[in-house]
Amino acid sequence: MNRTLSIPVLACALFAGQTLACACTLKKVEIAPLAAENGDTYQGTVDDVRIVFHNDVKDHPVTLFPEPPMTVQHLQPAAECVVHDGGVWGRDGVWLSGDGRTLVTTESSGSAQDLVFRDTRTCAKVGQLDVAGVQWRVEGKQLVLDGGPAKRRAKRVPLDAACRPAGVVKPRQ
């Protein structure tokens, strides 16, 4: 009998306090127009969670949603919440945690750009990371922030079990 256990699985098993963090995955949500490409309603669905955006521009495809609301709908059981505040949302900057509990969006306002983490049941902001001037990517169970004006070394931000930044990350008011 082969008793070899992979290092990541062993590490997850050994650190009981971190076991749930091993389950975090972020899925990219493809946001597409509800009807024709030049419609005003765009949506993306992953599993039983649908995210809906609106844009008044109808004469060409959009990549940004400059005005609230953003609606988060759970299909089973049926429920929804609405975000009435926020900056400009990016069409290609939407992720959902594997368990459907956390929505991650890019939001910008002026020269500021943030990754905003929201609870999908309440739409409450539960975390926020400043990513202005840096390149970032989702890499497994962490976010990697590269560069910036000072060309600093990459910063790795671990994600907890709910795919939210681990540690204290307070939302800006």
Image: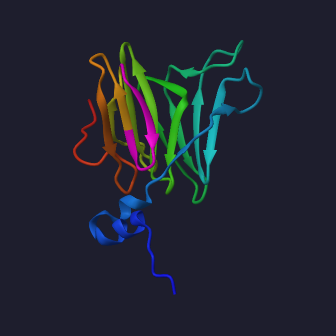
Rendered view: 167 above or below 14:
above
Residue 146 horizontal side relative to residue 54, left or right: left
**Of 152 and 78, which appears nearest the observer?**
152
Q: Quadrant of residue 65?
A: top right
Q: Nearer the viewer, residue 145 or 43?
A: 145
Scheme of colours in the image: rainbow
- Single out the residue that lies furthest toward the right: 36
> Of all residues shown, which one is farthest toward the bottom?
1
Q: Main secondary structure of the magenta part?
A: strand
Count numbered badges in the picture: 0
Q: Residue 105, position in %: x, y?
A: 46, 34
- Residue at left 52%, top 26%? 90
Q: Residue furthest left?
A: 168
Residue 161 lies, with reference to residue 133, above or below; the image says below
Q: Residue at x 45, y 48 (%)?
A: 140
Residue range highlighted in magenta: 133-143
Question: Split into 4 quadrants, where in the image is the C terminus?
Answer: top left
For the point 62% across and 39% down, the residue is: 44
- Which residue: 42% across, 43% down? 123
In the figure, 42 relative to 23: above or below?
above
Is 137 covered by the magenta stretch?
yes
Q: Percent from the top left, x then y, of residue 133?
A: 36, 19
Please state if 7 lies on the left or on the right of 78 as rendered.
left
Percent x, y of residue 30? 62, 37
In the image, residue 172 lies at what x, y percent?
A: 26, 30
Is residue 105 located in the magenta-colored stretch of the structure? Answer: no
